[in-house]
Image (cartoon, rainbow, N blue to C red):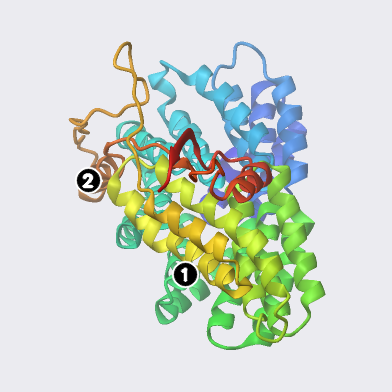
Amino acid sequence: MLEAGAAAYAAGDVAGALRAFQEASRVATGTVRINAMVNAASMSDELGDHRGAIAAYRTALDLIPADAPRLRPAALVNLSQALQHVGDLQGAQAALENARDLLVGSTAQGDLLVACLLSLTAVAIHRQDWARATDLATESLDAAVHFAPELAGHPLLNLAAVNFETGRTDQAVDFAEQALAAFRAADNPTAVAETQQNLGLMFLRTDRLDDAEPLLLTSQAHLERAGIGHRVGIGLKALAFLAEGQGKTERAADFYRRSLDYFQATGAVLDAADVRTRLATLAYSAGDHRLADDHLAAALSTYAERGLGLQCAATDYWHAMLLESSIQSDPALAIRAVAIAVPAALAIDSVRHSFATGYQRDRWKRRIADPAMALAFRLAYATGDAVLLADLIETQCAGTGLREIATTGPVSKQIPFDRVVAPVPVGPSAPLHLGVALAGFAASAGLAVARPPKLATTDGRIVLADHIAAAEQRYGLNVRDPRVLKVW
């Protein structure tokens, strides 16, 4: 039954795999039963029953004997994925760190180490901790090349996500296409469909609608046939965004609502929050500002409860943009908009100082931070607040300082400049070797920079003090260095 379940899953029949694993767990005993329970929980998670999967994983973990060293880390890694789906990033991180401790030094379980690193990367991506996500994705790709080349597509896809979110779109598409080739070579149709969906999303977000549409339609057809729940919801959201870009507003709203219903029913709260921001945009365009505010407030609450400060800032930035679009008809909205736009811009801009390289910082600034700051400037001008405008100008002219690094003792988080990854032959290895090389480049070291200092006027007033305080309190992020510099 276990073999039948595995074969069904490999063929894309997730529901059939679940039935086989459930039957195996009913009739088997010992470690065979626990294996079947873990596999059944994994299938439930893919089909969208995230909370049921979490309960099943915890039951299996309680039954694992001490003399089954492989079962526990495998169950913990799978549990972490279900926890991520319901937004419990702290629980997912704890499960993965536990699994990683169990796997240290065990070369016989290299495939599990790869899976653990992949999930740790996913948590870092959720938290938008791009420097850590890059390091983990690079480490997991290196581990996959050595231990489980059939899994190499997954870290390549993570590298695509990290590069895309930090503004390196060409590299992101290249990584995604390498992942697609790797999954095809491994004869994994479900992973191919998921990668097509991810690549389609990248094309959507860069306004390449004609390139995105066939990828999204092809992947959605496979995912719906296979009943892969969470990905079906993502596909509905993507098709809604495509319809919105094509000017088909009613079709887009229908897809968004179906996607939201799906994510809420399965407990995928972070995905539901993202859909709410799109529904808010449509509601605002239709003049239903109350509904738009309700959607945005629900999204903010979801992100704040999980400590996702940068997501909160991005949601506020989007909200301020929506408010800006109505200022001509209601000038009073400018005051409300500027109060959320300036703290959001400060938080978004501060993120670039966490990147390892000047290239990444520059791309983040030009692609993401500058538009947020430009909105803050426009809204400050709309309110006629000359002091705020002057303060914003001062902060933009202040420049960036180097971060102080201790000169004694080990610096464990510094990446050596001579870092190289030796190629390892693994069959059709060119895509994998290229991926490793690019991953090393993406994680290459640069000069560490500090967050911007606080600025003080000649009379001792801290520039943007209220907005800095609002950003740090609202988003839980340190947006300014403790140093204070005087302006002239």
Name, please, the residue furthest toward the front.
459
The 10 Å Cα crowd at callout 2, few under 14, some 14 to 19, many 20 or more, is some
Q: Residue at x 19, y 36 (%)?
A: 423
The 10 Å Cα crowd at callout 1, few under 14, some 14 to 19, many 20 or more, is some
The circle drawn on residue 354 is: none
The number of callouts visible is 2
Q: Which of the 4 image quadrants contains residue 6?
A: top right
The spot of residue 406 in percent (x, y) is 34, 18
The spot of residue 107 in percent (x, y) is 38, 20
Provide the secondary structure element on which disc 2 rests: loop
The circle drawn on residue 205 is: 1
The spot of residue 50 in percent (x, y) is 72, 46
Which mark is first along the chain, 1 or 2?
A: 1
Kindly tell me whether residue 383 is visible in this rendering: yes
Q: Nearer the viewer, residue 113 or 184?
A: 113
Q: Which of 344 and 308 is in front in this view?
A: 344
Q: Which of the 4 image quadrants contains residue 293?
A: bottom right
| Residue 58 versus residue 217 in the image, above or below | above
Q: Nearer the viewer, residue 423 or 328?
A: 328
Amino acid residing under circle 2: Ser
The residue tagged 2 is 429
Disc 2 versus disc 1: distance between alpha carbons? 31 Å
Amino acid residing under circle 1: Arg
Q: Which residue is drawn at 67% across and 32% down?
A: 91
- Compared across the picture, whether 414 is left or right of 274 comes to left
Q: Nearer the viewer, mark 2 or mark 1?
A: 1
Q: Which residue is drawn at 32% across and 27% down?
A: 414
| Residue 39 versus residue 399 in the image, above or below | above
| Residue 447 versus residue 34 in the image, above or below | below
